[in-house]
Image (cartoon, rainbow, N blue to C red):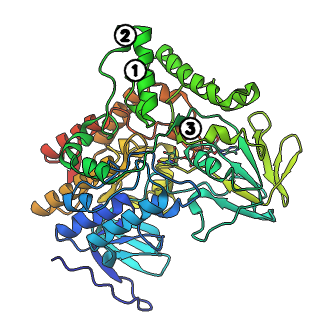
Amino acid sequence: MVESAVMEKPTKGSSTILKLDAAVIGAGVAGLYQLYRLRKQGLTVKAFDTASNVGGTWYWNRYPGARFDSEAYIYQYFFSEEIYKGWSWSERFPAQPEIERWMNYVADRCDLRKDIEFSTTIKSAHYNDDTGRWTLETDTGLTIDTQFLIACCGMLSAPLTSSFQGQDSFKGKIFHTARWPKDNIDLSGKRVGVIGNGATGIQVIQTIADKVGHLKVFVRTPQYVIAMQNPKYNDNDVAAYKARFDELKKTLPHTFSGFEYDFVEDSWKDLTPEKRQEILEALWNDGSLKLWLASFSELFFDPAVNEVVSEFVRGKMRERLKDPALCDLLIPTDYGFGTHRVPLETNYLEAYLRPNVELVSVKNNPIECITPEGIKTADGTVHELDVIILATGFDAGTGALTRIDIRGRDGRSLKEDWGNDIRTNMGLQVHGYPNLFTTGAPLAPSAALCNMTTCLQQQVDWISDCIQYLRDNNLNVIETTKEAEDAWVEHHDAIANQTLVTKTNSWYMGSNVSGKPRRLLSYIGGVGAYRQKCDEATADAYSGFDKR
Ligand code: NAP
């Protein structure tokens, strides 16, 4: 059994309080597994999290309606059959409380808590060229001296909480979905405004529509949506998916998106319109992300194919909305289906048909500010509200890291570097930042185009194996070369720029944050192809990485 790091009590004036082999930032999906792996390898390691408990995304996003869009039986850890089979899901796409309980179960089964410092935020991380080590400072007054720093901060963990002028003046209550309080918020009888109709806003809207007094939804860009099929699981269903453990473990890492399914094998051009329609109907009826990620790959590249699939989805939405005015406001026409994240929903469109729900289009009449009474739009109208819910999203991929003062070689700042250009080598390392590893960071599938658990486990495995390699070979420091990083960025862009994803504005392109350099955050060459690239570097003694 590996001993945990002994935490010295902070003493006034002392500089080094905690000496580690590895510090992990984050106790979410990636952070927990990273801690588990490195501890198993015999490193002195601790994880740090701002939250008071494990869960990461599933700790913070406790807003009404939060639930999986990945099937529960694949959004899983696959490193332990016992752990996989020891937990039984209640439905196909469970809700946040169940997911949070599952993450606690994993932490307990692996006895991880003793090595996690909760309610502790890493404020700064500075690399020391002479020692080849990192010095971290926390908001609790701790100083940490560590050889390796592994940032498992999550790609969607820096919420955009202050998007509007005048927020502080509002007399009612404002909540960002990713900072939803643990206490139950009573919305009954209240006048509630929701800003944002991404995957999060949609879940909130469909969940609270029949619980509030009056709901105003401020819609700027409509969304293509897929109706979720979410059957409850009985004992037989649970036994059936558990029996597939080996098969799923083998399959998931090699598909395009880390799900159990992959694109239709037939080429679009070889099929008749009737056959295409039949396939689209079957994918639609599955009520999952299949229509997006296991459909025709051509929809990502060919505008004509994309338009047919987009029109197919529009048709499905029209059937439900009926009202032409609502169709105009809620059905996208100026970008293609699947060119950013497609949300699953349950009665989201029907919510707008309720008498207590009102759509306020802010496309041509933007939100100007928040006043003491509510939300003011450019036409001068003040929409009076008791509660405002910001489902306004995140500074994705980069935000969690740039909020920490990270300084690499020669004092260079990651915030400044990524403020100019977002670059990584395979999303695992950044040139100029030795011994810093990242998961869920830009330019890897885990930044957006993946079933997160599949990709995060692969990245953690790669990082852990790399650290083991260094230790086995008496090496202390590793850093991606500039040439390898340049080559990866070029490869990433070459694939990305062939797709329609780069033509659509969304957080995938960083366009939801003013001034953020534009680049597809996620590697779109596929999870299997990405894994192969990572494995090639490993097999070639970590070629593309300087070691000393
Ligand atoms: P998001 O997709 O970035 O959506 C933010 C929303 O806020 C958009 O509708 C955006 O409108 C709107 N918005 C932002 N600023 C605005 C302004 N000034 N005026 C009007 N509208 C404004 O964020 P999200 O919904 O939180 O989702 C982020 C990601 O989290 C998802 O794409 C998904 O990957 C993940 N997620 C997953 C699940 C799940 O798996 N079940 C659930 C929720 C979220 P515009 O589009 O016009 O900018």
Q: Residue 217, relative to residue 83: is it above or below?
A: above
Between label 3 and label 1, give the one nearer the viewer: 1
The crowding category of the residue bearing disc 3, from other C-alpha atoms within 10 Å (few below 14, some 14 to 19, many at least 20), is some
Q: Amino acid at mark 1?
A: Ile
Q: Is mark 3 within 8 Å of ligand 1?
A: yes
- Residue with the mark numbered 2: 271
Q: Could you tell me which residue is drawn at 69 percent across and 66 percent down?
A: 186
Q: Quadrant of the N terminus?
A: bottom left
Do labels 2 and 1 touch, CB within 8 Å? yes
Q: Evaluate whether residue 163 shows in this view.
A: yes
Q: Dividing the image into four quarters, tell me where ligand 1 lies.
A: top right
Q: CA distance from mark 2 to mark 1?
A: 10 Å
Q: Could you tell me which residue is drawn at 33 percent across and 80 percent down?
A: 18
* 20 relative to 246 in the view: left or right: right
- Residue with the mark numbered 3: 506
Q: Amino acid at mark 3?
A: Ser
